[in-house]
Amino acid sequence: MCNAAKADGTIDDAEKEAILGRLGDLDDEEIVYLQEHLSGPVNLAEFTSNVPDDMDEQVYAFSLMAIKLDTQKEAEYFGKLANGLGLDGDTCNQIHARPGQPEIFA
């Protein structure tokens, strides 16, 4: 979710709220961790290499919930995320349909 929010180069208030709203109550340590991840660089290769194989679709879906997919940079990020997670375009388009996000895979 943090990487997706950073994909277009800015994290707006709606994206922050989308992330915080899905995480519930956080303790101080969790807030610091989240702030570090929101302010740090995107390292997609490292991130995707740490995702368990059975969680690929869920990770993609949660990332998509953090943003309103409306920029080319975000679409490029999700293309790279799908590739890193080993997800095909049809699967990703099905995931996009659930929250009403635009399809980006032909």
Image: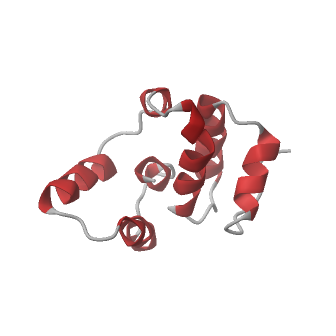
Position of 3 relative to 15 (above/below): above
> Is 89 left or right of 60, judged from the image as shown?
right
Residue occupying image coordinates x 21% and y 56%:
30
Report the number of discs: 0
Residue at 59 percent across and 66 percent down: it is 68
**Image location of residue 14, percent across then percent down:** 45, 73
Residue drawn at (77%, 54%), measured in percent from left and top?
A: 94
In this rendering, position of residue 35 left or right of residue 66: left
Query: Does 92 appear above or below 42?
Result: below
Q: Residue furthest left?
A: 28
Residue extending farthest right: 106
**What kind of colouring is applied to the model shown?**
secondary structure
Residue 67 x, y percent position in the rendering: 53, 63
Image quadrant of residue 29? bottom left
Q: For this rendering, which residue is in front, 83 or 7?
A: 83
Quadrant location of the C terminus in the rendered image? top right
Counting from the top left corner in percent of width and height, residue 86 is at 66, 30
Q: Specify the quadrant of the image occupied by residue 18.
A: bottom left
The one of 67 and 50 positioned closer to us in this rendering = 50
Which x, y percent locates residue 72? 65, 51
Considering depth in this image, is 76 or 57 the residue closer to the camera? 57
